[in-house]
Image: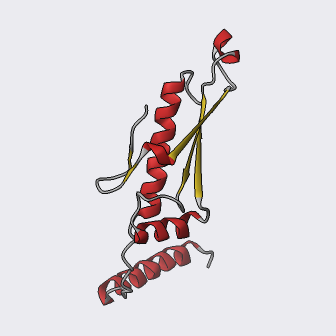
C-alpha cells in the first residue's frame, strides 16, 4: 500500500508526507488479534505539505481548523485492508476540504400564481374544518 495518495486529478500526496502508525486492534480476530498490529493510523500534515497549491492549502487549513489530519482504521482484520480504508478516508477528507465553495443562492420570490394557489388551498381547508364544527 505504499506509493502516492491520489486525492483528485490535480492533487497527489507523495508517500514521504504520509506518516503511518500501527497498533493492536480490538475486536474480532481470534488468536491473531493479540499478535498482529492491524490497527492503522494515518497522519498528514496539511500545513507543511508541498503537494497542495497555496490557495488550496489555505482553504483546507481554514476548513479543517488544524494543521494535521489523523485518520484511524481498525474495522478489518488485516492490516492491508485497514491501510486501504485509512488512505481512502484521508483522500475523501482532503477532497472535501479543498473543494470549491458552493455557489451562492440567488434570493427569489414565490410567483403570484403559487401564492394564490397556497392561499386558495388554505381557504379550502379552513372551510372544510368550519363545516365540521357544531352549529
* Left or right of residue 49, residue 23 in this image: right
Expressed as whole percent of the image width and height from the top left, the position of residue 37 reads 63, 24
Apparent side of residue 75 relative to residue 9 in the rendered image (left or right): right
Q: Looking at this view, is 63 or 23 the one in front?
A: 23
Q: Quadrant of residue 22?
A: top right
Residue at x-position 39% and y-position 43%: 4
Whole-percent x, y for residue 18 in the image: 51, 45
123 versus 132 height, above or below: below
How many badges with numbers are in the image?
0
Quadrant showing the C terminus: bottom right
- Measured as percent of width and height from the top left, residue 59 is found at 47, 70
Vertical position of residue 45 compared to residue 72: above or below: below
* Above-or-below relation of 105 to 39: below
Q: Measuring 39% from the left and 86% from the top, which residue is drawn there?
A: 107
Q: Residue furthest top?
A: 31
Write the residue at 56% across / 71% down: 132
Viewer-nearest residue: 32 or 14: 14
Q: Is residue 3 left or right of residue 90?
A: left
Q: Quarter-wise, where is residue 51 in the image?
A: bottom left
Q: Quadrant of the N terminus?
A: top left
Amino acid at each position: 500500500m505504499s506509493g502516492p495518495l491520489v486525492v483528485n486529478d490535480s492533487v497527489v500526496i507523495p508517500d514521504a508526507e504520509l506518516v503511518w502508525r500501527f497498533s493492536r486492534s480490538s475486536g474480532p480476530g481470534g488468536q491473531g488479534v493479540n499478535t498482529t498490529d492491524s490497527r492503522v493510523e494515518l497522519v498528514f500534515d496539511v500545513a507543511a505539505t508541498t503537494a497542495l497549491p497555496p490557495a488550496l492549502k489555505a482553504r483546507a487549513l481554514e476548513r479543517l481548523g488544524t494543521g494535521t489530519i489523523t485518520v484511524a482504521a481498525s474495522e478489518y482484520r488485516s492490516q492491508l485492508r485497514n491501510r486501504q480504508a485509512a488512505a481512502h478516508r484521508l483522500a475523501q477528507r482532503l477532497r472535501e476540504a479543498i473543494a470549491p465553495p458552493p455557489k451562492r443562492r440567488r434570493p427569489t420570490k414565490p410567483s403570484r400564481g403559487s401564492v394564490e394557489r397556497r392561499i386558495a388551498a388554505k381557504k379550502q381547508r379552513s372551510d372544510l374544518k368550519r363545516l365540521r364544527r357544531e352549529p
